[in-house]
Amino acid sequence: MSTPQGESTLLTVTPYIRNDQDTDSSMLSVKVKIIEEETHLIAAEKDVDMGYIKAQSLAYNTVPLRVVNPGNYEVEVQLFQEGKLLGSMSSFVIVKVNSSVNQPADILLTDMNLVITQFTDRDAKAVVDISPGIYNQGGDSKALTMVVTAKTDAYTSYTESDELGIVKGPSQLRGHVRFVLPRRAEYTISVTVEENGREIITSEVTEPIKMDKIERNVTKNYPLVEEGTPVESPIEEKASSSKDSTPGFKGLVTCVVLLLAAGIIINRGLESKKEGNEELHGWKRR
């Protein structure tokens, strides 16, 4: 689809797909559609190959799409394996014209990069650099502070912070903190953004992170989901000998939708759909 001329809104949709099984997936692809809720017409769509996803690993791709008019939109992501639809997930958003220069900041946490730069203490500890992504889809912020917490249990946690200062809107950037963490532990990582000392958003990674499973100087990327977002349980696996079944693969699709051009966007929620007995599961926002 050709890019509209003149002023438009650029939506960047990032589907994250996780293979939870012990075998590599077959060839995967996603189709992203931007659908006008009132007319049910497709305003934009794009197909993206995800390739093969190794066992117990996460993959993602960024899909930029433009819409011309403000309004209510459904952002639908369909997951395919070798051309067969496994399931879909939709995020509902409102795109509004940015008519006020004095509007408040509207902060989202998008994803998190993690890299182990070195091992210390006879390889018992790891120096870990964490860079959460932040997106301000509103006006200019007041002074922002990013607080990152890595927790192993209810009694043990590690906290570092980064002074981000004023973040212009709309814009995006990454914070940066450094930890020295015991390697043989599993961590739940959360990120909080404070504006002038007041907490405005907290998000967390979608799964515990095992440091001893991460190689040095390999950047890992994790989606961040707002705290309190309920997790939809995966469908119970049904015993089947059907030739149409696709064993060995589960998909977790979670979508990050950002506004990167003129206008503002409001996320109205997320819903998922499954096809047949496939085990697509994901996150819901209410």
Image: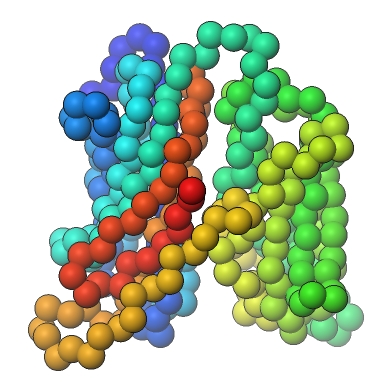
Count up the numbered dots: 0
Q: Residue furthest left?
A: 243
Image quarter (top left, top right, bottom left or bottom right) of the N terminus? top left
Taking 54 as reference, is 232 above or below it?
Answer: above
Instruction: Identify the residue at horizontal 77%, vertical 69% (top origin).
Output: 151
| Nearer to the camera, 181 or 267 | 267
Whole-percent x and y of residue 262?
Answer: 48, 17
Report if residue 156 is visible in the image: yes
Q: Which quarter of the picture shows residue 152?
A: bottom right
Report if residue 44 is visible in the image: no
Q: Which quarter of the picture shows residue 211?
A: bottom right
Whole-percent x and y of residue 52?
Answer: 33, 67
Q: How is the image coloured?
A: rainbow
Whole-percent x and y of residue 266?
Answer: 49, 31
Whole-percent x and y of residue 195?
Answer: 79, 34
- Seen in the image, is 173 located left or right of residue 7? right
Instruction: Identify the residue at horizontal 24%, vertical 26% (top origin).
Output: 38
Q: Which quarter of the picture shows residue 224?
A: bottom right
| Nearer to the camera, 277 or 205 | 277
Instruction: Identify the residue at horizontal 26%, vertical 63% (top origin).
Output: 274
Taking 79 as reference, is 145 above or below it?
Answer: above
Taking 68 as reference, is 180 above or below it?
Answer: below
- Seen in the image, is 26 located left or right of residue 112? left
Instruction: Identify the residue at horizontal 61%, vertical 24% (top origin).
Output: 138
| Nearer to the camera, 142 or 18 | 142
Q: Residue furthest right?
A: 121
- Seen in the image, is 258 located left or right of residue 217? left
